[in-house]
Amino acid sequence: MGGGGVKQEVYEEVIERDEGACQDCGVAAAEVHHVVRRGYWGKNAKQRGEVVENLICLCWSHHQGAHTKEAQRRHLTLLREKWGYIYDDFPWKGILLEA
């Protein structure tokens, strides 16, 4: 499973949290995906996207379709409802409020 440059301890925490399974379909995950892409955080806040609240395990197939605003909202909503994460600041709040 690819870590996409995520720190090892954060990567392992996401895999443990998601039990190594794709959060869209339940099969073995192939990727740890940044829900909100790293570049969205800006140059000075690059590390901010490297937190468990912004990462999700996905299989290869679902990772291919995960780069849309709709998928971002779906994954942030899933993580918020399943784990109680709070997304009340930039950029999460704006994505969740977009319709």
Image (cartoon, helix red, strand yellow):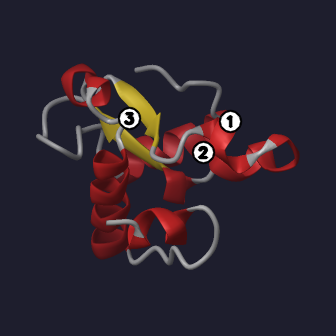
* On-image quarter of the C terminus: bottom left
Whether pointer 1 and pointer 3 mark residues with C-beta atoms closer than 8 Å, the reply is no
Element assignment for label 1: loop
Q: Quadrant of residue 98 in the image? A: bottom left
Q: Where 89 sits versus 71, above or below?
A: below
Q: CA distance from mark 2 to mark 1?
A: 5 Å
Q: Nearer the viewer, mark 3 or mark 2?
A: 3
| Callout 2 touching callout 1 (CB < 8 Å) | yes
> Badge 2 local density, few (<14 within 10 Å), some, or many (20+)?
some
Residue 20 position within the rendered picture, expressed as x and y whole percent measured from the top left: 30, 37
Q: Which residue is mark 1?
A: 7
The amino acid marked with disc number 3 is His
Seen in the picture, residue 62 relative to 37 is either above or below; the reply is: above
Please state if 25 lies on the left or on the right of 48 as rendered: left
Reading the image, the residue beneath label 2 is: 10
Q: Hey, what amino acid is under mark 1? A: Lys
Residue 7 picture location, percent across and down: 68, 36
* Residue carrying label 3: 67
Q: Nearer the viewer, residue 18 or 23?
A: 23
Lower position in the chain sequence, tag 1 or tag 3? 1
Give SS at disc 2.
helix
Viewer-nearest residue: 37 or 52: 37
Which element carries disc 3, helix, strand or loop?
loop
